[in-house]
Amino acid sequence: MGNWSGTLSGAAPALPPVFDDAHELADIPRDFETWRLHEDHSGDGLEAVQASLRAAAEHGAWQWPDKPVVFISDPHADADGFLRSLLAAGVVRRGTHEILLTPFGRAAKIVIGGDCLDKGPSNLDMLDALYGLMASGADLHLLAGNHDLRLRLAIRALTNPRSVLTEHLFVRMGRKIMPLLREVCAAYVSSDDLARVPDEATCRARIFPSDSWYDAFPVAAAPYLSKAAIDKEVRKLRKKSRRFAEHAAAEGLSMRMVYASVIRCHDLFLTPDGAYSWFYSAMDVVARIGSLLFVHAGIDDTMCAALAEEGMEAVNTRYRKEAEDHPFAFYTGPVANLVRTKYRPLDKLLTPEGVHLLHRSGIKMIVQGHVNNHRGQRLLSKKGLLHLEGDVTLDRASRLLEGLPGIGAGATLIFPSGDVVGLSSDYPKAKHFKPEHHPLGGPE
């Protein structure tokens, strides 16, 4: 097992030489290179990264965590990719029936950056692996991802009273959660459960928005969305409605089975004694550690102001309240933008004013998932703010689709010394970043 307890300080420190599970981790890099900020960028390139570093430096020194932080994001229902990432980071060793922390794992804080669900191969195995990590005694911080929220909003849309603003949300969210519904149907839905749900036509009517929704929704949604966003939502619903039953059938599910599975998901995930109730109960939307803000996707000016003026706990409290009380306003608002944005024109805006607020409050870099990469982690500037993209494409479904071999593995490690290390099975070196070691003027 890799021993990460030593402090990294040089420009190219040596990686620990030994893994207990070397046969599982032969594709994990063992040598360092200085993080190549000029390669594989999006955004505005190296000069923008240097400008972001200079702007952050104007507001004081970086504040680093008082214990190592391990960031793993977007496992997407691949427990093996998740466990390999924990092994690669030196956090755990596998016992016969449980996850066992290493000394480094006991000393570290582990931040899971969201999107534990969807894609595959098994949502329930992934949840069980995550619970095993929690049960090991790890100092664990679980963040919400957009795929995680899909399930929560879909369940509530189908099990709560219908309204114009919510009756479409199950079909809107439902296609990507079909594999999970299939797993839940197989593991938890009994013949008695199926006998209690209505006939196929009635279940279909409860699952799909009514015909009148297409006229009523634009009026009801006007306080929350622009006309362009409303038009896009309606177009999406028409398209998704045409294909929804096909996606269910591809998973072997009738509308009655879908409906029964959602009711069982409500019991499993959203009731206090449900087998997976811990998943949403443990979930926050942001974590701040020193100068670093951990979030699934990104940020906008409204959340910059909230963090600067009220702090992290206030934002997390707002997340829990809005997700519970106002699902549509929540999903289309600035809090859910933290798990959805890709800084597209229809996303909530991040401007220089918001970036200045974050810098002034001591936040210098966003550590995120959400944008999957094929050659390890990336450091780049987005809207003038330094971002570290930590989604390294762990799950087999995405890897197969995108031409990557095998099961992924990777983690971002951040040390009290100010050293940041990016590990990925898809890049031959461990990337090493330390702000003061990177020139802020000319090219590297």
Image (spheres, helix red, strand yellow):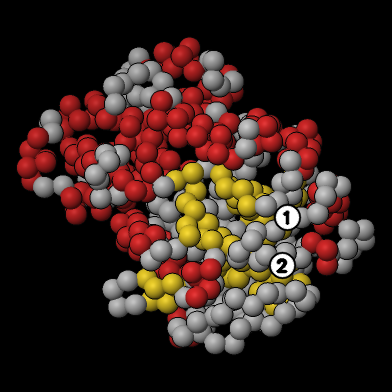
Q: Say what amino acid the circle numbered 1 marks.
A: Gln
Residue drawn at x 46%, y 85% as measured from the top left: 20
Q: Secondary structure at mark 1?
A: loop
User: How many labels were placed on the picture?
Assistant: 2
Mark 1 Cα-neighbour bin, 10 Å: few <14, some 14–19, many ≥20: some
Q: CA distance from mark 1 to mark 2?
A: 10 Å
Mark 2 Cα-neighbour bin, 10 Å: few <14, some 14–19, many ≥20: some
* Residue nearer the viewer, 194 or 354: 354
Q: Which mark is residue 369?
A: none
Residue drawn at x 38%, y 44% as measured from the top left: 281
Q: Earlier in the sequence, mark 1 or mark 2?
A: 1
Left or right of residue 375, residue 126 in this image: left
Q: Position of residue 172 (x, y in %)?
A: 40, 34
Q: Which mark is residue 63?
A: 1
Residue 178 visible in the picture = no
Q: Position of residue 417 (x, y in %)?
A: 71, 67
Left or right of residue 227, residue 157 in this image: left
What quarter of the picture does the C terminus occupy? bottom right
Q: Position of residue 336 (x, y in %)?
A: 53, 35
Q: Quadrant of residue 101?
A: bottom left
Residue holding disc 2? 417
Q: Say what amino acid the circle numbered 2 marks.
A: Ser
Is residue 395 depicted above or below 264 in this figure? below
